[in-house]
Image: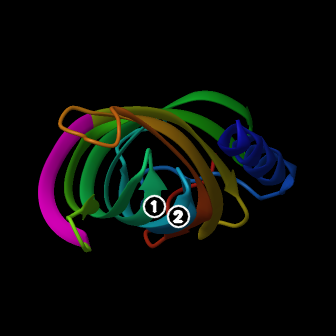
Amino acid sequence: MKNLNWAIVIIIFSVSASGQNTIEKAKGISIMGGITGKGYYGELFYNQHLATKFQIEVSSRAERAQINGYAINSYSINPAINYTIFKPAKWLHLNVKAGLSAYVNERTNSTLNDVLLVNRNTLVLDYGVFAGIETEVYMSSRFSWITNIRQNYNINSSPGNLIFYAGTGVRILFMKKKTE
């Protein structure tokens, strides 16, 4: 519930920002930070707008969290497709996204030996799918403020199959497009 409250605050903050106009067929890079479980993550994206409503992205995420009793340090690659479902103004887009995830997790498991507490680090390959919602507020023709809420379903995950992420960041567009 605490994560959901933070996610609502992040969306309200992003929708209250203002911007200018959107641009078409841009490429961009984004940097985002956020919360997950009892921890945090950072993510770097590459985006390519294919058409007015479609964009593809590839991201790399690093996270450090405590989820269901597991200490996790993970690194992932996440290809995705974004689709704009709502555009109430030229400067605001609401996107849905779906994609795949491939993780390398370093997990720390503690076991109690007869005398000592033994920590074991294990590298595990996880994979899964995710779906989410993203708001994008264009602040100029080169910058937009993004927020992202998504739910991952991990196939091979000891901490649990469903992991929630909420974050915010900035997108820098590096190819000028014509305005609407």
Q: Amino acid at mark 2?
A: Tyr
Q: Position of residue 140 (x, y in %)?
A: 70, 67
Q: Residue at the top extreme?
A: 85
Q: Secondary structure at mark 1?
A: strand
Q: Residues within 10 Å of mark 1 (few under 14, many from 20)?
A: some
Q: How is the image coloured?
A: rainbow
Q: Which residue was labeled with disc 1?
A: 65
**Quadrant of the rendered image containing residue 56:** top left
Location of mark 2 (residue): 40
Tell me which label, 1 or 2, sits earlier in the chain: 2
| Residue 26 percent location from the top left of the image | 43, 58
Q: Which residues are magenta?
A: 117-128
Q: CB under 8 Å between callouts 1 and 2?
A: yes
Q: Quadrant of the C terminus?
A: top right
**Image quarter for residue 55?**
top left
Q: Quick one: label 2, few (<14), some, or many (20+) residues within 10 Å?
A: some
Labels in figure, total: 2
Which numbered disc, 1 or 2, marks the residue closer to the eye? 1
